[in-house]
Image (cartoon, coloured by chain):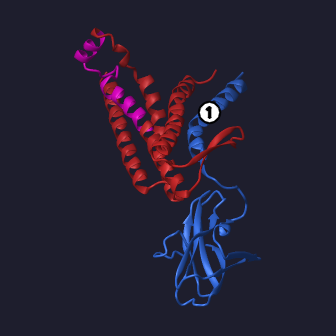
Amino acid sequence: MVTRSLVKLIDEAIIPAVSLICGKMIGLLASSYFLHLPFTFKNGQFLKILPSVQFQSLEAYTTAENYSNLVMFLVAAAGTVYVLVRAHYFHESHIHPSLHAKLVAIGQDWLVAPSYHLYHQAVIWLVFLWLTVGFLVLSTILGTTYPQIAIIAFVVAANFSWVLAVDIEKEIELGKSQ
Amino acid sequence: MNYTKILLNFLAVVLLIGLIATPFYFARNFAKVAGVKSSSPYLLVSQIEKFPNITFSQSSDAYRISLAKQGPSQAFLGVLIINNPTDRTQTYSLEVTSGQNSLFFGEDPNNLLTSIMAPSLTSVPVSLYSPEEASGESQTVEFQIHIN
């Protein structure tokens, strides 16, 4: 009924979406706690039912926003790194036989994943990573995020995309040779 | 049968887009600066009651602050707060139309900012500086706020 790839993408999008929301919340609350930024919770402000965090001053808001956006980006980057490492070293199609044997010996062969699974996961994480970059750029334009964070995020996302492209290239070469 | 398939796939795409958009919608709206949403390009909040011998009044789009000087040069920090209740960054500028005193954004009397960019849902203090040249015991300053 529903395309298999679409179901797989939805399935793979749940964890990144929840992780990014948690990253943002933890970033906001941790920066407020450790930097002693005054804030209050106001009920019914977000989607008419959920509470929102309200800062008393522009400085406190900007500081908390910067740190929380950075944490959100780090979460997206960490997820992407995890998928890229798996795609590069634990890819079923080109994992080194001795590494595969070692993983089987220690019972960690669950790390080895097929292209179908890895590429769906990689696409989702990269979409989240690039959207986070877009969000940071937009926040920079609106004046709530330091431009340095957006620039670093862009460079990191571009490099991660390049690493995935290298892996896809390798996969295509393997497909041709078979 | 085909229509059901198209509909289900369409709904799946909508669900996927929703899942992807949710964290960013959340990130955009979860934290705010305390303030009120309004269609007005700015909200001016008076802090005058914290300062003795200062009065604040408004006539149309012109504002007036009257004060009794107690020293040759004085700065009154954060007498007003300007809040941007809109969903976009606004650039505000202060124009003194009458009086020898100056108004500036922020709280640094060594940096008299008369124009400032305020991101959406943020607040900026407005301070008053009365220089030595404004020598009368009773001073009045009239000003307007412009949006660029």
In-front residue for pair B67/A23:
B67
Q: What element carries label 1?
A: helix
Toward the left, the furthest residue is: A98
Q: Write the residue at 58% across / 40% down.
A: B21
Q: In this view, does B43 lie above or below A148?
A: below
User: Residue B137: percent from the left, percent from the top?
Assistant: 62, 87
Q: In this view, does B6 lie to the left or right of A24?
A: right
Image quadrant containing the C terminus of chain A: top left
Q: In this view, does A161 lie above or below B99?
A: above
- Main SS of the magenta part reads helix
- The three-letter code of the residue at mark 1 reads Val
In-front residue for pair B15/A69:
A69
- Residue A91 highlighted magenta (yes or no): yes
Q: In this view, does A39 lie above or below B44?
A: above
Which contiguous range is marked in magenta? A76-104
Which chain is home to disc 1? Answer: B
Q: In this view, does B49 lie above or below A19?
A: below
Is residue A131 visible from the viewing direction of this image?
no
Q: Which colour is chain A painted? A: red
Q: Write the residue at 64% across / 62% down.
A: B83
- Residue that label 1 marks: B13
Is residue B57 visible from the viewing direction of this image?
yes
Q: Which colour is chain B painted? A: blue
Q: Quadrant of residue B57?
A: bottom right
